[in-house]
Image: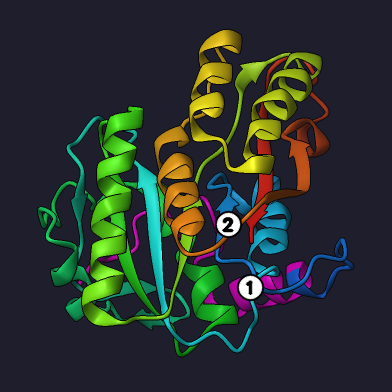
């Protein structure tokens, strides 16, 4: 079993407190976006800073969804791309892996490298709370190049074809890191705009042009490629905010975006 590594730091460790916080996030009024997204971008910072934005992203998927969430997050420690196929423990209970789908991904299994990685774990309480019957297929990306994103997307699509699973893809990513608020707003929105048409080459071009420090750009690209192949036509920015909303420090912010691909 994959044990919690950031409960008590990124999100509450006490189950009742975590459930109350998630309930508050999902009850708040949200922009009107049809709940039919095939994929989302959700941030992975501490819930105090980015939890509401993550809830906005997950709210674009019907709460009745009971298929498989393919959760793709970056490795912050530089480990190689790999998958996990064990149950994941969080304060709200156990999230079961879809082992048949994970095996069909035909990707390297590495539980050790994922033990302390928060980019995937931070998404799990949202899934457990809102989609209690869903299972997960966690994918941690090392190389985030456009070519690597295409390979990951091909593995996901191949697994969908072989298993017939109903899937939703979660790309775990924050946007600009530790830059002035004005810079984050300008660069991040410019980069995100390329996803309106799911234009992955333009997304990478704009990342290079701006130097925006988007930590999960590979998972975002892979998610867009998968969803486009599944019939998605556009990406919609549901919410964008920065850490300054919580800290009031406008000199060194981190950007958070909720994006729905449908």
Mark 2 touching mark 1, by CB under 8 A?
yes
Mark 2 → mark 1, Cα distance in angstroms = 9 Å
Taking the image as drawn, is residue 67 in sight? yes
Q: Estimate the x, y position of residue 134 in percent, counting from the top left.
A: 44, 83
Q: Quadrant of the C terminus?
A: bottom right
Asked if residue 133 is positioned above or below residue 87 in the image, the reply reads below
Q: Estimate the x, y position of residue 165 in percent, counting from the top left.
A: 34, 81
Q: Residues within 10 Å of mark 1 (few under 14, many from 20)?
A: many
Q: Which residues are magenta?
A: 1-25
Taking the image as drawn, is residue 122 in sight? no
Q: How many numbered markers are drawn?
A: 2
Q: Is residue 257 magenta?
A: no
Asked if residue 225 is positioned above or below residue 91 in the image, the reply reads above
Residue drawn 87% across the image and 61% down it: 31
Q: Which residue is mark 1?
A: 61
Asked if residue 245 is positioned above or below residue 261 in the image, the reply reads above
Q: Is residue 159 left or right of residue 262?
A: left
């Amino acid at each position: 079993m994959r044990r919690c590594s950031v409960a008590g730091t990124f999100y509450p460790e006490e189950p009742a407190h975590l459930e109350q916080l998630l309930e508050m996030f999902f009850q708040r009024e949200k922009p009107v976006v049809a709940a039919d997204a095939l994929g989302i971008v959700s941030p992975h910072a501490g819930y105090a800073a980015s939890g509401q934005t993550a809830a906005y992203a997950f709210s674009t998927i019907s709460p009745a969804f009971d298929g498989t969430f393919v959760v793709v997050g970056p490795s912050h420690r530089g480990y190689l791309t790999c998958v996990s196929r064990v149950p994941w423990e969080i304060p709200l209970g156990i999230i079961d892996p879809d082992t048949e789908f994970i095996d069909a991904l035909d990707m390297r299994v590495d539980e050790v490298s994922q033990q302390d990685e928060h980019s995937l774990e931070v998404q799990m309480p949202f899934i457990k709370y809102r989609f209690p019957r869903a299972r997960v297929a966690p994918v941690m990306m090392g190389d985030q190049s456009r070519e690597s994103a295409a390979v990951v997307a091909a593995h996901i699509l191949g697994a969908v074809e072989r298993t017939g699973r109903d899937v939703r893809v979660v790309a775990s990513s924050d946007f600009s890191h530790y830059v002035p608020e004005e810079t984050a707003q300008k660069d991040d929105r410019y980069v995100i705009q390329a996803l309106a048409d799911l234009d992955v080459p333009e997304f990478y071009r704009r990342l290079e042009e701006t130097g925006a420090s988007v930590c999960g750009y590979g998972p975002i690209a892979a998610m867009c490629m998968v969803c486009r192949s599944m019939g998605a036509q556009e990406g919609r920015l549901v919410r964008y905010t920065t850490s300054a909303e919580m800290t009031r420090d406008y000199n060194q912010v981190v950007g958070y975006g909720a994006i729905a691909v449908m």
